[in-house]
Structure formats: structure tokens, C-alpha cells
Amino acid sequence: MSEQSVVRFDVEDGIGVITVDYPPVNALGPGVSDGIIAALEKGEADPNVRAMVLMGAGRTFIAGADIRQFGKPRAVPAKRTYDVLDQGKKPVVAAIHGYALGGGLENALACHYRVAVPSAKVGLPEVQIGILPGGGGTQRLPRIVGPKVALDMIVSGRHVPADEAKTRGIIDDIIPGKDLRKEAIAWAKGIADKRPLPRVRDRSERLAEVKTDPGMFDTARKQYARRMRGQPAPEKCIQAVEAACTQPFDEGIATERRLFGELENSPEAKALRYAFFAEREIARIPGLPKDLKLPEIKTMAVVGAGTMGGGIAMSFADAGMPVKLVDASKEVLERGIGRIRDNYATSVKRGSLTQEEMDKRISLITPVETMEEIGDCDAVIEAVFERMDVKKDVFKELDRVMKPDALLFTNTSALDIDQIAAVTSRPEKVAGTHYFVPANVMKLFEVVNASKTAPETLAAAMKLGRDIGKISGYAGNCDGFAANRSRIPFTMEQNLMVEEGALPHQIDKVMEDFGYPVGPFKVNDMSGLDISYDTRKRRKAADPNYRMLPIPDGLVEAGRVGLKAGKGWYRYEKGDRTPHVDPEVEALIKKVATENNITQRSFTNEEILHRLLFGSINEFCKILEEGKAVRASDLDVMWLHGFGFPRYRGGLMFWGDTLGAREIYNQIAAWHQRYGARWKPSELLRRTAEANGKLAELKADKLR
Ligand code: 3H9
């Protein structure tokens, strides 16, 4: 694309207007910065130009540097826009709508003035992709808002709304934004003759804050200690802001540039960039016609007011969508509504929700006792007890009461959706919408395509998830669908390794060191060991060959059902959630191993990590082979948002590539010899290993 086409310059009423036009988000892609510089120079040289406006075409100002260019060889630019702006003799006003993020805000900060429309958001989110603001943001922002607020903005990467940005002095004025160009020109005319030009680099008064609070940097280190685990970027963000307070501007800029260079190609930055694009790619389902006419979903119903149904209802109310919650039992319904109220009240107490917002959300949830009352909703999600006969009865009822064009979704996590759809007269309008617990918090929204689901229904379900702020991911109809199915080997190996001699706290530590917020056994204790025990018993009743897990079974049978009982894999003091290693558990493990003739041995940390993760990589490949997921990176996103996989490792398949498909295949083949069928390598994995291919780039040939 030529420079002319990505940046336009024209003069109106004595004001030079620089318009960045690089869809979709005006990132600073090839030619954009050079185009801005050329336009600034033109404006400086034109005697008819008194002042200039920098703005974006389309839906946003500038979303930052072009993330796709990071990690690729780039020429060092002869000039940087920031320096050209600093050296300019004519005032430049940044007129912000949509987002001014990263390099976008940094350019705006180098302008002399900033105005924004009320809905605009500004921020320096670089830390979220493992880097730091490298266009002077760490030096200019503290000069405006003070180092303490700058630390908060830069280390968290949060988006700051226009009204807060105005209060903090980041923007000078809020303009209505009905006609951004016209209003910005008028604003620029108002300041065109003012001198001296205000340059952020010349300001230092806010930096003095550090003298009254010299401990602020260590406080930030402590505050962000959890987030910083395993990641270099937050620490370097802090160092850069520290440099703003201790070094002259140009030296500070040099420090920022050095720190930026140290981060750009770090493994964490590469992984976070991968996650950023994978999260956008997951929305695309190949083969869906582009011009599909989607049924509109404006009103929702949820069947079943248990914990899951209540959480699902909240997910709609949180997004401002009206939802009817139906349960045949008045008592269950009242309890469900009470639980929703309690959940919201906790958020109000914590300060993350206002009372007014809580009241608004509650008012969007209408409890009803009969199915007839939900008949006019555009779509319904069933969240009743996980048993096929119960689900079939509900779907027969839904088919009868719901208007003919309503979509019928099931939140089953394991049952065959084809069988559920078959009891209705509209199987093409049936799909799975699988939430993760807690439904109102977890971002993953797995959309299950049954064999008769129409493309419109599938696409509408995917969109529904995105509309309520979740990440929708495609899965085919198979046992466990994509996400849970890929996780089964992890859970299995977790338990089998304990039989073989690894201790729960050792396994937890390995996974926490790897980056999981909490180890898997602690998670089991939090969610309760009894639920999976009951599932195992049901499976065993249905299939005599099903293998029970004697250690967790033994724990449950001894009353050790987890945190709620004060004991599970760990021991807990009354009223305290801290897990303590319990010799009783170790004794039980030894006893079970002896009874089952299992020889115990010691495990290295690496063996534990590989045993837990390689089985799921193998399963990922099998899922793709069977066409039950679109691409490996979708599964990576599912693990990030469904199971707490550490984001700075990109995703399971991305991490696998850091070891190489060949190493993983060889190990799996060896375990297949040693442990038998559960480690049978996938054909796709074998082929990928032989071809030295990338796991994260694998795709299904065909969706089934
Ligand atoms: C930086 O600035 C470094 C500097 O300090 C200076 C260094 C010297 N680059 O998210 P969406 C694509 S680092 C390339 O679906 P939304 C995105 O992939 C950068 N592409 O829209 C997608 O493409 P596709 C700091 C980008 O409305 C399409 O645009 N800035 C970039 O939900 C639409 O995106 C950030 O980290 C980019 N910077 O959300 C901001 N941004 O259609 C990153 C987006 O092919 N961006 N794309 O899938 C965002 O947070 C969101 O995109 C935004 C819009 C909030 C702007």
C-alpha cells in the first residue's frame, strides 16, 4: 500500500488535517508513520496552515504499532513521528475517537493538544503483549499524570475512558464527536496562535511526586508480583517509569528503547502475540457463507435455575440483555434468584459493581415458573440436570412452547446433541452452547455443531457468545466436545502419577512454577472431589471395564471431599483456605499402591510436566484429525480461557512447538510401549513430527 493511501493530508480553513486511513484499526503499519511525518512536514512548510489535526478514518484513532510486524526484521526509521512532532513549530491537535492505544496514544502524547469524543478510550496496553510502550509513552505519560498513575496504567495496560482521561489531564477537552473532523478543525482554530507550544517533554512538575513517595516503585513491584510471575515485561515497565523520574527526557527515551529491545523477541512476547491473534482467529469458521442471514437474538431464556442456569442468566444480564429464568420448582427458582442476588451483592461489597448497576442487572432477569412464559424469546439455553432422558423431556417441551423461529441451545457438557435435537421438529435450530464454571465469569463459550445444525444457527450461536463478551469457539459433537475432551488425559495422568509415586504437592508446584495460578490438586479440593467420584461411579455402572481411580476414590470414601470438608488432597485449618500437606494422604497413597501392586518411584519435575501436558497435545491432534475442532490455535484459546493455562506460554500447542513435535512424538511413542493404549500416538502428530511441522499451525482437513 502506498504512503498516500494510508495517510491523507488536506487543508481546510487554515488547518492541515492528517488522516490515517489504514483499516481496520489504523495500526502503525508499513508507510503509516512515514506518511504522518510527510504530512507534518507539508503542513510546516505550507504558509496557509496555522495548525494541524491528527485523526483516524473509520472506526478508530490509532490502535498502536502493527503487532504483526514485531519479531520481523525492520529497518530503523530515519525519523520518528514523536521527534518530528516535538520539533514542530505549528500546533498539532490529536482528535481521538474509538481507541488511542500504544503507539496511537504515544503519538497523541507527542502532539501539543489532545481532544476526544466521549466514547473514546486511551491506554498503553503493551504489557499485555509482553513488551512496553516504546514510543516515549513511559516518559511522557508520567509527566502528565504523575509516576504513580502512570505505573498503574502502564503495568496494568488498562483502557482509560475519555472522562477519566480528561480528569487526569491526558486529554485537554471532550468534544461531542457528531462530526469529528469539523469539531477538531474548530478546536484547532481556537489554539492556532497560542505560544509557546505546550510540549509534554518539557514538563517535569508531576515527576516531583516521587520525592514524597520514593517507595512507589517497590510498592508497584509488590502489587503486581502475581502478574509478574514468569514475565519480564511488567518489571521493565516499572524500570522505564523509574527512568522518567531519574533521568533527563532524552536519556529516559534511550532507556525505554533499550528495555523495549530486550522484550520484543522474548519468548513471553512471542507467546502473547500468538495468543492475541489466536483469540481473533477463533471467530472464523471455514466454509460458512459470508452472506448468511443470521436470526436476531435480542431476548433470551434459560431453563433451570441451579448454579449453572443462574450463572448463565447473569452472563446475559451482565451484557445488558433481558433474560427469563424458568424453573418448574418455585423453591429452586427462589433459591436461584437469591444466589444471583448474593453474587452481585458480593461484587458491590468488593467495589467492582455499583448498587445501581446491580439493580439494573437484576431487573433484566425475570423469573418465571412455566415454560409457556418463555415462548416469545428469540433463543433459549437449557441448563437442567445432565441426564439424557431429562434433557429430551425438556427439549420436547421447548419445541412445543418456543416460537417457530426460536433457536434451542443446550448447555450439556457431555451428552450427544444429535439425540437431543432428534426429539424436536427443528433439529436445524439446535446447537450446544457450553459454558465453563462459573458461567458468568469464565470467558470460554464452546459452540457445538450437531449433525443437523444449520449454518445460520451455528453462526448465530457464535455471535451470541461474542455479544455477551465471551470468546466463542467451535467444537464438533463428540464425547466431551473439544475443550473438556482435550483435558481428559491431563486429569488422568495427574491421578496415575500419584499412584506411581509423585506427590500431589510436588505436581501442584511443578504446574504453579510453569505458570498456572493454582495447581490441579488444589483446584480439585476447591471444586470438591465428590462430583468426579460420582461421575466415575456412574461410568463404572454403565461400563464394567471402566477404571476407577483408587486414590481419589479412597479420599472421598474417607470423607476427604475437599476444602468444604476441611480436608481433601490437602488439610485445611478452620476458616482458612491455605492448603497444608497432610501425612495421612501420603499414607493412603502408599497403601493403595501396595494393595494394587504398583511400584512407586520418584519423578523429576520435567517428567511430571510432560506427562501432564503431552497426552493433551496428542488428544488435540486426534480432535483435529476427526474434524471436531477447526484449528490447533482454537484449542489453545480454549485452554487459556477455560482452564487457566498460562497466557505467557501462548497455549498448549504453541508451548509444544518450543520443544518440537518430534520430541513430543518420540516420548509419546515410548510411553505407548510402556503404558499401553492410552498413549497411542495420533497419526496427525506422527506426520507432523516426521515433517518437522508446527503443532500450533495444524488445522482440520474437514469439519465433521
Ligand atoms: C505498540 O503500540 C508499541 C508501541 O509502544 C511503539 C513501538 C515502537 N496491530 O480486536 P479486533 C487487528 S504495541 C495489528 O477484533 P475490536 C486484529 O488482529 C500495540 N493488527 O477489534 C483484527 O484483525 P482481523 C499496542 C491489529 O474492535 C482487527 O484488527 N496496541 C492491531 O474488538 C480488529 O481487531 C494494542 O495492543 C494492531 N495493533 O478491538 C492494541 N490491533 O480482523 C491491540 C488490532 O484480521 N488491539 N488489530 O482478525 C486491540 O486491543 C483491539 O484490536 C482494539 C479493537 C481494542 C483496538
Image (cartoon, rainbow, N blue to C red):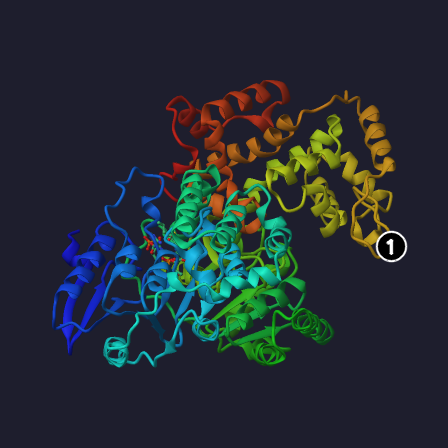
The residue closer to the viewer here, 546 or 499, is 499
The percent coordinates of residue 398 (x first, y second) are 54, 69
Q: Where is 660 relative to 386, above or below? A: above
Residue nearer the viewer, 338 or 485: 338
Name the residue nearer the viewer: 385 or 25.
Answer: 25
- The residue that label 1 is drawn on is 574
In terms of image quarters, where does ligand 1 lie? bottom left
Amino acid type, mark 1: Lys
Dividing the picture into quadrants, the one containing residue 259 is: top left
Label 1 residue near ligand 1, CB within 8 Å:
no
Give the left or right position of residue 197, taking residue 258 as reference: left
Q: Specify few, some or many for label 1: CA neighbours under 10 Å numbering under 14, 14-19, or 20 or more.
A: few
Relative image position of residue 154 (x, y in whole percent):
49, 57
Q: Position of residue 600 (x, y in %)?
A: 77, 22
Describe the element under mark 1 as helix, strand or loop. Answer: loop
Residue 603: quarter of image = top right
Residue sitting at x 42%, y 52%: 133
Q: Can you give x and y, in whole percent of width and height, for residue 699 in the image?
A: 38, 39
Q: Is residue 388 left or right of residue 193?
A: right
Q: Is residue 407 visible?
A: no
Q: Residue at x 33, y 46 (%)?
A: 68
The quadrant holding residue 290 is bottom left
Q: Quadrant of the C terminus?
A: top left
Q: Residue at 30%, 81% (x, y): give it.
A: 178
Q: Is residue 186 visible?
A: yes
